[in-house]
Amino acid sequence: MAGVWELALHGSEYRQFLPDLSIPRFTTMKKQDAHEYARAFKEGGQPPWLHALYCHWLDLLKDPFTGVTTDGKTKPDLFQLQDEGIPIEEIVRATEAVLSSLSAEQLARTKYHIDAPEWRTWSNPEFLLSDKGIRLDEVASDVRDKVLAVLEATLSPEGYQKALGAMRVNGFLGELVESPAVMNEFSYNFVVFGEPSATRPWGFQFYGHHLCLNIFLYKTQIVVSPWFTGAEPNLIDEGKYKGTRILEREEKLGLQLMQSLSSEKQTKAQIYKLMRDPEMPHGRWNHDDQRHVCGAYRDNRIVPYEGILVSDMSDQQQELVLGILDQYLLYLPATARKAKIEHIKSWFKETYFCWIGGYGDTDPFYYRIQNPVIIVEFDHHSGVFLNNKEPAKFHIHTLLRTPNKGDYGVALKPLIPGTEQNFIWPGERD
């Protein structure tokens, strides 16, 4: 018979780790709205480790944007302007419909300059650390529907469903811990950068607990980066959205790839055997991101290559890599996704795959795929609201970055006519 822990890695077994809702953390939380909850955290500094991390994030924000790199030096000429066939007019109309529905006060909170540093102030915890834009659970239902229409017009159909799935799972978690005012299906903020236009650069941000999307648009080209998607638990097993499950394909394909490698390649790919390995250097693991290296506010992270080269894998294994990347690029419309995949394939000679943890069927794990034009990370986490102390397969964090200034569309800025001296955040100029 499978052990309790093995069972807990699948399906509804997360219920063995439901928290005690009578403790002060939850009795207090259920009495607060999102703003009271965030204010108590910022002013009270509890828990200390998370407050310290928040203060560290603010320090990181002071640094000029350089983008994620392998060695602190940005590789030039990696990105180009191109026609990716996105329905820009439809996206513009949908966004204008939102903006025209807002009050003057809401509009002032929602519209930012295209080069506003607030691009970088997204985060994935349930704490409303950066309160900008409109929050969907605080606006009229027709305004909320119009914001969702912007997402639907922008993302691929399957990407839109993935985003809805993350939102619904967040709502389910709020119900589990009896704190729907803090976490619910619509506890997400929407912000616009620049003027919606079919000919000029602009973008928007949609962020909240376990779903953060940064979307830059120029004509028929789109950049969805950085983004974060997570779930705790990753399965809704009762209620209105029963059966909703997200991030299982990324998990399955990653494990399939690792298990398909030769023992020699597995040893080289596995950079740490344990999820919190004593061999890890200081800072390699932290409470919030755990094994992730490119989370919120880590816009300038130096991430050296680790693991094995994808170009040394078999054709079948390379297809698994492409299958994983296809899932990570699911938010992109089909034409843009195809173009991105081809761009990534052209860098297979400098694409690395690394792994942390075991690779048995029930083992929790972390993996990363990285080259000059993309970084994707997958991580099984320990409990944040659930009380599993060890990483489990029902709590998943995933993210995507575009290195070498590709995040937020910044690498495209010198290529856009008339913007050579614009779209530069404070501190970037010499």
Image: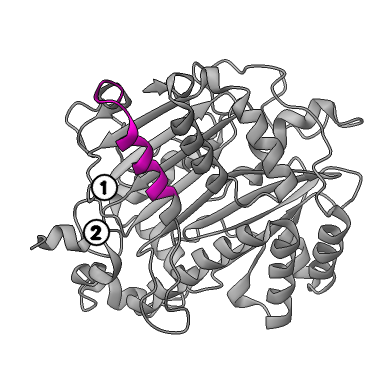
Q: Quadrant of residue 99?
A: bottom right
Disc 2 and disc 1 in contact, CB within 8 angstroms: yes
Which residue shows up at 82% across the image and 34% down it?
A: 82
Which residue shows up at 27% across the image and 69% down it?
A: 25
Mark 2 element type:
loop
Say if 206 sits above or below 178 in the image. Answer: above
Name the residue that disc number 1 marks.
Answer: 364
Which residue shows up at 24% across the image and 59% down it?
A: 9
Q: Quadrant of residue 304?
A: top left
Q: Which residue is more in the foreground, 335 or 140?
A: 335
Q: Residues within 10 Å of mark 2 (few under 14, many from 20)?
A: some
Q: Which mark is residue 34?
A: none
The residue range painted magenta reads 250-265
Q: Is residue 411 left or right of residue 123?
A: right
Q: Amino acid at mark 2?
A: Leu
Q: Is residue 266 left or right of residue 39?
A: left
Check the image and name the residue furthest to the bottom: 239
